[in-house]
């Protein structure tokens, strides 16, 4: 018999675990169906421009794998990932100064799964995760789903401020809170676009050592630099206190869903066990295809192609902001996908979004990247997917929205949000292209 507890829409509401209260719909999910229309210039989603891939090389790898290793590709694989892919991953990490053993690498279903496994291993209800202010929306969603609290640490154009980190650790411990780890995106930060300086990397590592805080170094964008490489990975100077996360989603294609974690031995063993309990093994087909591509294609040259393409789009976005919205402030990233914009005083990016979509331009409001709902004066613009001409047109449309909001503000008072009829699903994750 079906139990009658819960809402009219979900008769099973009363049976969900307490931790599902941390799974909630993105505040902008309802607008993304509209923003995905072709006439809308979307500067919201962090989708790589996969059309720049040499599809003939990818297709050749697919065909070669099925022809030469078809039976293996279609079978269950190792919970840790194929040895040949892990060898290639070592070569990739070496470009950022990381030296490791193939046994220390765990292949995951995208780096998002690696984050989920880490949260599963470490987080209990009421624990605290330290993170930059702002931080990646997908990570915060995972931490909340395990009933942890995200405590933000201030950052500036050089990344997280070490003194602020020390102060936050001290205040949390004085309050009796239990800190489980520090989550960082040091290179071309999502959403802020800034890069943690080398000097600060060393300071933060020293603070973490002294305070006994594990560091999760999330590095999906590190190879996508424009004018100069980012500093070497934090994992290059600290092996025991850092779990390093990488991904092929930005440098190859997200559709393969291949990421990895490089972890100290004891954590590595638990990651493998947690991964096996969740999915038995990652996709052997995708692992072998990616391995073949890395062995036979000019993958470094392809990353250079992506760098040039994204640099051109970054420049188009910055030029358009300077032309159409010179009174705003923004970060100027040296790589990655994102620019973080600060609006003039009194404007609200979350309230302004429905009006922007009506004007056929979309962005992600800053509130998505703060655990406490702050960030209304900010928005994230993504330049990775639209071509330069569309980016410029998108900023022109955005400028008309901002000017309209400023006129309303000067005539009346700070404008409130447009009422939206949003669904109330119990368990929904953010849209996949929001990351």
Image: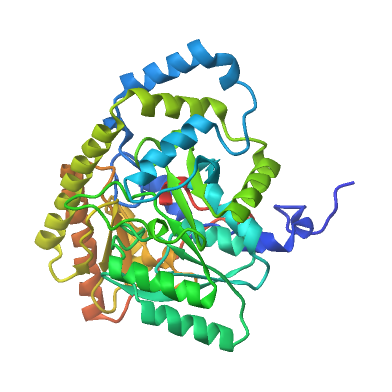
Q: Vertical placement of 242 versus 384: above or below?
A: below
Q: Quadrant of residue 404?
A: bottom left
Q: Nearer the viewer, residue 210 or 331?
A: 210
- Whether residue 96 is visible, yes or no, is yes
Residue 264 drawn at (x, y percent): 55, 55
Residue 403 drawn at (x, y percent): 19, 67
Determine whether, in the image, residue 59 is placed left or right of residue 197.
right
Residue located at (28% from left, 50% from top): 360
Q: Nearer the viewer, residue 4 or 125?
A: 125
Q: Vertical placement of 95 versus 68: above or below?
A: below
Residue located at (42% from left, 24% from top): 292
Determine whether, in the image, residue 313 is placed left or right of residue 56.
left
Q: Nearer the viewer, residue 237 or 181?
A: 237
Q: Vertical placement of 238 versus 220: above or below?
A: below
List the single residue furthest toward the left. 323
Residue 166 drawn at (x, y percent): 44, 81
Determine whether, in the image, residue 332 is placed left or right of residue 260.
left
Residue 56 drawn at (x, y percent): 32, 19
Marks counted in the figure total 0
The figure's colour scheme reads rainbow
List the single residue furthest toward the right. 1
Q: Quadrant of residue 380?
A: bottom left
Residue located at (47% from left, 58% from top): 239
- Whether residue 421 is visible, yes or no, is no
List the single residue furthest toward the top. 67
Residue located at (68% from left, 67% from top): 124
């Amino acid at each position: 018999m079906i139990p009658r507890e819960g809402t009219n829409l979900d008769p099973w509401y009363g049976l969900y675990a307490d931790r599902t209260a941390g799974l909630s719909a993105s505040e902008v999910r309802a607008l993304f169906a509209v923003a995905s229309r072709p006439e809308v210039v979307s500067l919201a989603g962090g989708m790589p421009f996969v059309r720049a891939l040499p599809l003939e090389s990818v297709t050749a790898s697919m065909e070669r794998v099925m022809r030469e290793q078809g039976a293996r590709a279609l079978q269950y694989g190792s919970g840790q990932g194929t040895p040949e892919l892990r060898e290639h991953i070592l070569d990739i990490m070496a470009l950022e100064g990381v030296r490791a053993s193939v046994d220390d690498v765990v292949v995951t279903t995208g780096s998002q799964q690696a984050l989920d496994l880490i949260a599963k291993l470490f987080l209990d209800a009421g624990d605290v995760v330290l993170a930059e202010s702002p931080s990646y929306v997908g990570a915060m969603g995972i931490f909340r789903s395990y009933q942890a609290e995200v405590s933000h640490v201030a950052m500036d154009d050089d990344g997280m401020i070490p003194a602020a980190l020390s102060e936050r650790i001290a205040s949390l411990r004085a309050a009796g809170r239990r800190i489980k780890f520090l989550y960082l995106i040091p290179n071309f930060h999502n959403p802020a676009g800034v890069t943690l300086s080398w000097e600060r990397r060393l300071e933060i590592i020293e603070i973490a050592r002294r305070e006994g805080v594990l560091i999760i170094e999330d590095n999906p964008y590190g190879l996508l630099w424009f004018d100069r490489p980012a500093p070497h990975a934090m994992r290059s100077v600290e092996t025991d206190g850092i779990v390093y996360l990488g991904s092929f989603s930005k440098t190859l294609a997200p559709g393969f869903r291949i990421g990895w974690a490089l972890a100290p031995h004891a954590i590595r063993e638990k990651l493998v066990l947690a991964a096996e309990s969740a999915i038995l093994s990652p996709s052997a087909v995708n692992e072998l295809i990616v391995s073949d591509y890395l062995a036979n294609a000019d993958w470094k040259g392809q990353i250079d192609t992506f760098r040039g393409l994204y640099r051109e789009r970054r420049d188009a976005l910055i030029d358009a902001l300077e032309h159409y919205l010179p009174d705003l402030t923004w970060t100027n990233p040296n790589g990655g996908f994102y620019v973080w914009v600060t609006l003039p005083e009194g404007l609200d990016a979350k309230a302004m979004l429905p009006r922007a979509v009506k004007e056929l331009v979309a962005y992600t409001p800053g509130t998505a990247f703060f655990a406490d709902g702050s960030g209304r004066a900010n928005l994230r613009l993504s330049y990775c997917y639209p071509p330069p001409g569309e980016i410029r047109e998108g900023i022109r449309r955005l400028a008309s929205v901002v000017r309209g909001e400023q006129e309303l503000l000067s005539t009346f008072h700070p404008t409130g949000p447009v009422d939206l009829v949003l669904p109330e699903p119990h368990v929904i994750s953010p849209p996949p292209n929001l990351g």
